[in-house]
């Protein structure tokens, strides 16, 4: 797969340190929720390698957005882009969220900047007749991302903040206590994913899927830089069967597939 040139058509700033770039692709895209793109972030020393980003909203087959928090040189470069600027995108990459066979009670859990892969998932689940609830967690009110965008889809959205400035005070996973679910779909910090995994194991809730993040160099399975330990080694893969590549076998894994 080769990188393609995409064009920024709109730049939004939903939070002080977060930017959403709406981008025009050269042809129709049909990524699966949870898949990602490697985006070029300039050609400086610190930003030689592209960075992985889930796609966020889908405005038309050629128009997708990316939502990110500025944490380092790559995201700083992206945040500096303006409408008409161009960048390279390789993707869609990886394995996204598997959809249920029919209607279910689906609960989406996002922590921090975990909402991007869940917006299009919410839309797909609604299309299948699912009852969808989204739980959004963040440090504080201004860091809660994606609430109006998810509410615009017509789903119930509950929030939790560490300081209690919006919604429940405490970890977002505490909201799961009072909610019935057939399917759980989560993206966020590792601690939150571990809590979701533990809930999946305790209920039990086999249809629980976690979108993992890992540092990535290539994004398509060659460098092995993104490896995570499998819960059960795959004997068919010999010495490599102990690990799974987040970029290739993931980034979405069932809760019991990998050790996090
Ligand atoms: C499949 C996938 C999808 C992603 N989707 C999004 C998204 O939609 N929005 C978004 O904001 N970010 C997303 N990320 C994370 C994003 O790739 C990193 O934030 C970005 O690469 C940071 O680049 P940088 O050059 O700005 O910072 P760097 O200098 O590379 O890193 C700055 C700081 O962030 C930490 N960091 C870097 N990458 C990650 C990571 N993957 N997870 C946790 N901490 C990290 C570093 O350890 C360092 O402390 C995704 C990552 C993966 C693997
Ligand atoms: S990023 Fe290179 S193998 Fe996954």
Image (spheres, rainbow, N blue to C red):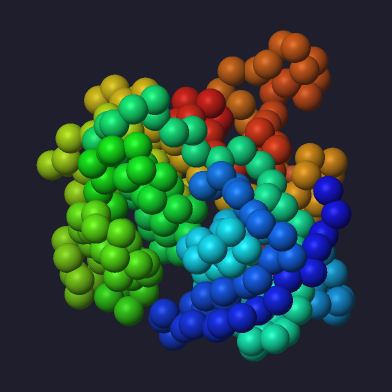
Compared across the picture, whether 205 is left or right of 214 comes to left
Work out which residue is located at the far left of the displayed protein and give it.
Answer: 178
Rendered view: 168 above or below 230: below
Q: Nearer the viewer, residue 227 or 133?
A: 133
Rendered view: 107 above or below 64: above
Q: How many marks?
A: 0
Q: Quadrant of ligand 2?
A: top right
The residue shown at (61%, 81%) is 9
The residue shown at (61%, 38%) is 95
Q: Where residue 111 sits: x, y (%)? A: 38, 57
Work out which residue is located at the far top of the displayed protein and give it.
Answer: 235
Q: Nearer the viewer, residue 231 or 136?
A: 136
Compared across the picture, whether 72 is left or right of 189 comes to right
The residue shown at (72%, 60%) is 27
Rendered view: 185 above or below 5: above
The residue shown at (49%, 82%) is 12
Does residue 191 appear anywhere in the picture?
no
Quadrant of res 180:
top left
Q: Where residue 73 sits: x, y (%)? A: 70, 77
Q: Nearer the viewer, residue 114 or 54?
A: 54
Q: Where residue 215 sits: x, y (%)? A: 68, 54
Q: Where residue 106 sits: x, y (%)? A: 29, 39
Does residue 131 appear anywhere in the picture?
yes
Compared across the picture, whether 67 is left or right of 144 comes to right
């Amino acid at each position: 797969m080769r990188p393609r040139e995409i064009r920024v058509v709109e730049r939004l700033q939903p939070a002080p340190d977060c930017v959403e770039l709406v981008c025009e692709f050269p042809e129709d895209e049909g990524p699966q929720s949870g898949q990602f793109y490697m985006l070029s972030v300039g050609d400086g020393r610190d930003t030689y390698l592209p960075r992985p980003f889930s796609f966020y909203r889908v405005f038309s087959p050629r128009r997708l957005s990316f939502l990110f928090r500025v944490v380092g040189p790559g995201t700083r470069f992206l945040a500096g882009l303006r409408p008409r600027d161009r960048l390279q995108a390789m993707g869609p990459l990886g394995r996204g969220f598997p959809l249920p066979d029919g209607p279910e009670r689906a609960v989406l859990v996002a922590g921090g900047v975990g909402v991007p892969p869940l917006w299009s998932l919410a839309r797909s689940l609604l299309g299948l007749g699912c009852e969808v609830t989204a739980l959004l967690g963040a440090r504080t009110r201004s860091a809660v991302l994606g609430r109006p965008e998810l509410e615009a889809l017509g789903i119930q959205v509950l929030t939790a903040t560490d300081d209690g400035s919006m919604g429940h005070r405490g970890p977002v996973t505490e909201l799961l206590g009072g909610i019935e679910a057939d399917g759980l779909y989560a993206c966020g910090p590792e601690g939150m994913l571990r809590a979701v995994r533990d809930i999946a194991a305790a209920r039990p809730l086999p249809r629980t899927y976690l979108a993992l993040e890992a540092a990535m160099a290539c994004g398509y399975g060659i460098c092995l830089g993104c490896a995570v330990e499998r819960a059960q080694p795959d004997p068919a893969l010999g010495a490599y069967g102990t690990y799974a590549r987040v970029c290739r076998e993931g980034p979405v894994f069932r809760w019991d597939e990998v050790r996090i």
